[in-house]
Image (tube, helix red, strand yellow):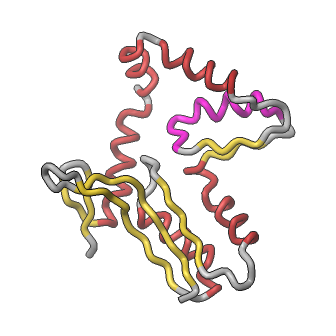
Amino acid sequence: MTQTHFGYETVDETEKAGKVRGVFDSVAKKYDVMNDLMSGGMHRLWKRFAVAISGVREGSQVLDIAGGTGDLSKEFAKQAGPTGEVWRLEENLAPLLGDCRKLLEVDSRFLVLTVYAVRMSALAIGELVKQTFGDLGGAVEMGEMAVREEARGLLLPTAIFARWSRD
């Protein structure tokens, strides 16, 4: 079994996604209340401001990466209207990856997907890449990307990845 980090713990890789999901689920209902308290309600104004200056208009296409509670996605969807599209990475990664596959040339050698999103794990995106590209042969690698903090030698996670290659 592969071990990975979850906060200050070392856990089995297969457990990490569930633990991350558990943390998210435990705060999700109170997320906006917590933000209200911490920002004095300013986060709601920041979100409205972000949507207002985004340039999203009728027919726009939006990719919301690490969309969390989805409140920005909902606001973007209002701006984009019925002819626009709003994709939330966590919810729409499979079809998005399928579209990426369609863009690959016949002689493509690899595809690398990197993600840093609270509700994802290397195992989850690795399995998704296997499902999407498995019939092409080759190999899929997955894992975490990190940088080593110099003072104490700690590994600091920067992203997770999955890589398909023809070999």
| Residue at the limit of the structure toward the left, as seen here | 152
* Rendered image quadrant of residue 143: bottom left
What residue is shown at x 64% (from left), y 85% (from top)? 135
Left or right: where does residue 147 sit relative to residue 114?
A: left
What residue is shown at x 45% (from left), y 55% (from top)? 120
Residue placed most toward the observer, 57 or 71: 57
Please check the rendered image and state whether residue 31 is part of the magenta-colored stretch, yes or no: no
What residue is shown at x 86% (from left), y 39% (from top)? 83
Please check the rendered image and state whether residue 67 is part of the magenta-colored stretch, yes or no: yes
Q: In the rendering, at what x and y percent does residue 74 appear?
A: 66, 31
Q: Provide the residue span drawn in magenta.
A: 66-81
155 shown above or below 38: below
Q: In the rendering, at what x and y percent does residue 136 appear?
A: 64, 85
Number of labelled discs?
Answer: 0
* Rendered image quadrant of residue 65: top right
Residue placed most toward the observer, 54 or 30: 54
Q: In the rendering, at what x and y percent does residue 86 appear?
A: 71, 42
Q: In the rendering, at what x and y percent does residue 125 appear?
A: 50, 64
* Rendered image quadrant of residue 58: top right
